[in-house]
Image (cartoon, rainbow, N blue to C red):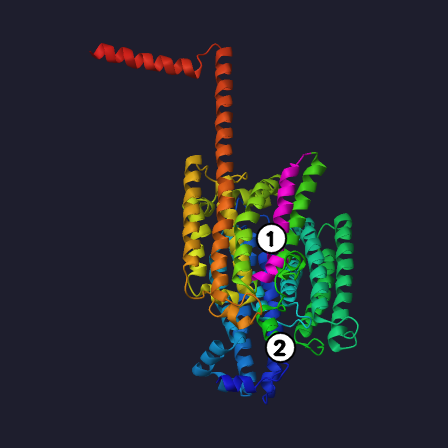
Amino acid sequence: MSKIFAASLTAHGHVITSNSLVSTLIPLVKDLNLLSFLVAIGLLFAMGFLIPESRGYLTQESIRLRSLAVLATTIWTTTVIGCFMLELANLLGASLLDAFNLSTIRSFIAQSSLGRDYLFQVVIGLALCLVLGRAKKARGVYGALALTIIALIAPIFQSHASNAGNHELAIGSLIFHVLFASLWVGGVIGLLALAPKTRELSIPRFSSLALWAAVIVGVSGVVNAWTRLNFLAGWHTLYGALVAAKILLFIILVAIGARHRSYIAQNLSGGAQLRRLLLNETLVMVVAVGIGGWLSGTTPPTSPSALTLEANQTLERVGQAMPPAPTLAHFLLLYVPDGAVLGILLLITALYIKGVRTLAKRGDKWPVGRTVSFALAIATVDFATSGGLGVYAHFAFSFHMIAHMVLGMIAPIGFVLSAPVTLALRTLPIGRTPDERGLRGTLIALIHSRYSVIMTNPIVALALFDGSLFVVYMTPVFGKLMNSHSGHLFMDLHFLLAGYLFFYVIVGVDPNPKKIPHIIRIIILFAAMSIHAFFSVALLSTTTLLDGGYFASLHRSWATNLLTDQHTGGAIGWAMGEIPILIALIATFIQWVRDDSREAKRTDRASDRAVAMGEEDELAKYNKYLASLQHREGHDR
């Protein structure tokens, strides 16, 4: 069956088919699939962020949109199944009826990433229908929206369409471009579905979110076009013309959006005129989305490659060319941007700066040390993912382990000390109505939720922090993760988030749903130190490679003894892992002393107030209590 699939594809991925009905149905079903998806994400966006909820529960209007969202999700799931069967028939050059064969379907799923992508989307679609049908609280809508976003971006990781070799930058920029374009277009659709009064209330909030989306869509689109298109020789091609048309439509959309928001805020109170303006904007967006779909199915202009077959295979597997032998200059100066991580860093940096500026406009001060801590953490993560360390981490286990330590133990401390949760609580908007919790109230509810209580339990934090080391590295999971861009991104985010959670529980300055005694924190730190040392010794004792053949397939010309390099990684993990934990241990002792000092001062102030009011202080009450016990004991005798 795999030979049949391979024979059905040309060198550029185009399909040879003899069934005109299938060829006609494919674009129609795909258009319906895209439209239903945009409607679904728009309705979920409106339910989660535009319609005021009532103390966490969905209002009647949200429930009305929930029914429409279930319908849109059902249509989307059905069209995914339709696309699956049509693509299968197209690949085989057979009729749609002939494609309905269980063995053929199983082979398509097992041997084709396209088939697996469709299956994944079907599973997500069915889960969405179940979640949405029972959702009564806003958190159910947030969960459904998260599932929708996962279904949207997961297939993007299969893309390797970067002519310049910047696969990670191309994929990362495409993720942000598609995600925020979908939220932007879907948000306008969601506005159209709202009742007039709710629409009027939601316009200011959507305007702010749309501005962020427009900036991200514009920047990510330019970056993605740059990775795929030769600016000097590619603009005369169909791909270049489509990119130019999309840029023009984007400029028109930004101008229309700005004009509409200003006009709406000054002159409109909702109704037919507002609806007409939104419809006009939607039409332009539909054209832009259509060109985007056409663009995704058009092969970018290629240029001849001077790389050897081995170098091309490395580029295909890793997403970047083999770097030269590591030197201090290469380690410090090499930079290959990881688009997904870099996009996340830029987004959270923009949000952090906005929060600090919001406080400054109110006349409140934000400690400079926290901002510096945040900046250092951002720079550290960037170096470990896109800088020289991040580059060599793709090619050698020892550098991978250094990057792991930086992401899991050094950068999280900087993020924890920057107090992002506290900043968010002080700057996020409150509800627009007395019953709406707003973003700030939602964050407070999340902090005090049962989920947060479980996740911030020291045992859970320790298990995720150190226990996951054995799950990732001592099982075949590591080799599988190293062989894909999504696997690299998963590991980077897991190390960072697990480290953040652990140090948040131990030395965090942000609000914690449950105060952990300092003695427990110290015990957890000693346990983490011991477990980490045991893991490092286990790495040093290995006699086989843990990467499933990944590093051997790269055929690097430096550090050719892979097992020695793996043992070096174990030694690095041992050395680098103990230092941050020791620093956290010292910080915990300092916090303990400060807390005791504050408690002693509080007690002294309470005693002074009691004496000033003619009451006995705590010490006098305690001495009186002891005297009463002694008197009672003497009386009993």
Res 429 visible:
no
Decide: few, some or many residues near mark 2? Use Cα within 10 Å; few <14, some 14-19, many ≥20: few
Place of residue 585 in the rendered image (x, y in percent of width and height, measured from the top left): 48, 39
Indicate which disc residue 28 carries.
2
Residue 546 magenta-drawn? no
> Of helix, strand and loop, which one carries label 2?
helix
State which mark lies toward you, 1 or 2.
1
Amino acid, disc 1: Val
Question: Is 141 left or right of 320, judged from the image as shown?
Answer: left
Viewer-nearest residue: 546 or 425: 546
User: Where does the image place residue 50, in percent across and percent down from the top left?
Assistant: 62, 52
Asked if the residues shown at circle 1 and circle 2 are in contact, with their CB atoms under 8 angstroms apart, the answer is no
Q: Main secondary structure of the magenta part?
A: helix
Image: magenta residue range = 364-393
Q: Quadrant of the C terminus?
A: top left
When asked about the image quadrant of residue 631, the answer is top left
Which badge, 1 or 2, comes first in the chain's sequence?
Answer: 2
Residue depicted at 41% across the width and 64% down the height: 543
Residue at disc 1, secondary structure: helix
Residue 301: give x, y in percent of width and height. 72, 77
- Residue carrying label 1: 381
